[in-house]
Amino acid sequence: MEKIVNYNLLQKEILRSREDFRQLSLEQKNCFMLSQLSCFQRSNSMVLSGRAINSRTRQKFDYRINTDRPVCRETVLFYYGETLWRLKSLQKHMQTVGIIPPVHGNTGREPIHALSSEDEEYIGLFITNYAVVHGLPDPGRDLRTGKLRILLPSILTYRLIHKEYESSIVSQDKKPVSYHSFVRVWHKITPHIGFIKPRTDLCISLEEYKKALNKITSDLKETFDAEKMLIHNQAVSHLRYAKLERDYYRGCIKRAEKHYQNLSNGKKATNTPNSKSITMHYSWDFAQHVCVPIEDQQVGPIYFKSARRAHLFGVCCEAIPRQINYLIDEKDFLGKNAATVISLLDQIEAIHGLGEKHAQLTADKGKAQNKNNALLQYLMYRVLVGFHERIDFSFMVVGHTKFAPDGYFGLIKKKYRRAKVYTYDKMADIIDLSTHNNHNICQRYYETNGKPAFFYRDWSNWLQKYFKKLPNITKYHHFSISKDEPGIVVVKN
């Protein structure tokens, strides 16, 4: 290694020292250099010349890397990556103040351009009043916020509202604040006011409440406040109901997770039906179809052609957690009807079921009464033949149907959009590789030997021979079937 002349300093040592010193904060650098200078300075206050002894006017320093390695000032500066200006400044500070770290002169002082409390209060009042006129109640779709907010239309932006604020305050002969200060005060004082994000699959009830609020605002009736408060209370009541249903769904998952964790490793495998005294929760849904072939870098002419479709149906066991995803080619897909759903569920329970005695099921609420009735009849059939002792079946509230299967579908779509998929087998590999710990498993319609993995059966017509239909089934959200009351369904709204 190269050495600095006369000081026996290795290049590797210097580079490490400069890197370590660079990672210190400014205050830490000042403390270190002041302590070093305190050790370097000469304690003698008198200077001896050839003719006389005089008082020292300039402080002298004996620079060192270690006690046994004296060096010059330039070497010390280079060793730590410091500048001569900072060194002289710290020397002067030590002579006048001591080894107390220097403090910036503006510390504790309020800048002349700082916002006053009156400015912040006016901004908060302006935003609040703006939200009263244009805001809408939070539909409760974002469950991570933990509280309801007031949402402004998605067409509005911070920039547009800031321009309206400037027009308002200039008319009062006051000076407006800058855009960035306006946004900072917004987040500080009124963090509960935000913007609606463009979405689909919205709750129709809340959308009707929004339209009613907008109509009342535009009509400017004398009963404006009373009618608006009435609609607001109705919307809040609907959100509370949706939250109760969501809490029930989460409670079912936590109960299933606790039962699954209490099982020994040998009993966590698939077992014969009705063999374990545990509660398991399953949920299922269809995903939007995927197209094959697809490329992450796709040319224009191919984009406008109709690709081959493959349909996804996922059944999620949240306690494991794991989702079985059925990948069905469009030529083998019979549609999203009762026969398809029941055939897939029957195959899932036969191959991947854990043998639970109590099953809790959750699904997206369909509009077709015949499909829902056929599904309910199938669940009664499972209890009657002894596959379960009890089944609790629930529908999600319409417009609030985001649940576990959607999350697993999202992981698949995230991998799918960034891949080159040319064949059915490659799409199956994408599903299996969408998670690191096999949380997403692909179940192909055709096995490797070319035979179908399951068969569609005409469950609807067969079940109608033995079970009656429940009238107005779409009015209910919860259904309970028990072996103690065979042939009876307990329903709850």
Image: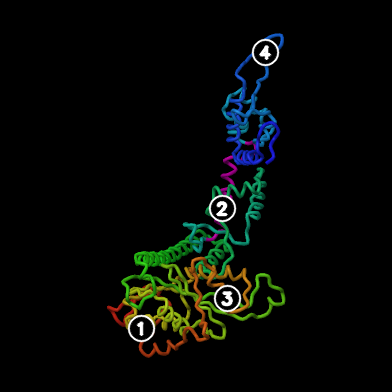
Which residue, given by chain and number where applicable, does mark 1 sit on?
Answer: 381
Secondary element at image label 3: helix
Q: Do we see residue 377 in this rendering?
A: yes
Sequence-wise, which precedes: disc 1 or disc 3? Answer: 1
The magenta-colored residue range is: 111-136
The amino acid sitting under disc 4 is Leu
Nearer to us: label 1 or label 3: 3
In front: label 3 or label 4:
4
Residue 400 visible in rendering: no
Q: Amino acid at mark 1?
A: Tyr
Disc 2 packing (10 Å; few <14; some 14–19; many ≥20): few
Earlier along the polypeptide chain: callout 1 or callout 2? 2
- Checking the image for residue 427, the label placed there is 3
The answer to whether residue 35 is above or below residue 461 is: above
Q: Which residue is mark 4?
A: 48
Classify 10 Å Cα crowding around label 4: few (below 14), some (14-19), many (20 and above).
few
Three-letter amino acid code of the residue under disc 3 = Met
Residue 110 sits inside the magenta stretch: no
Gap between marks 3 and 2 measured at Cα: 52 Å
Measuring from the top left, give residue 322's x and y in whole percent: 46, 70
Q: Where is the C terminus found, in terms of image quarters?
A: bottom left
Q: How is the image coloured?
A: rainbow
Image: 27 above or below 394: above
Q: Position of residue 236 (x, y in %)?
A: 46, 62
Mark number for residue 129?
Answer: 2
Return the disc, 2 or 4, that comes first in the chain's sequence.
4
Question: Up-down: is 111 above or below 400?
Answer: above
Q: Is the Cβ of the residue at disc 3 closer than 8 Å to that at disc 2?
A: no
Quadrant of the drawing holding the N terminus: top right
Considering only order in the chain, which callout, 2 or 3, is on the residue closer to the N terminus? Answer: 2
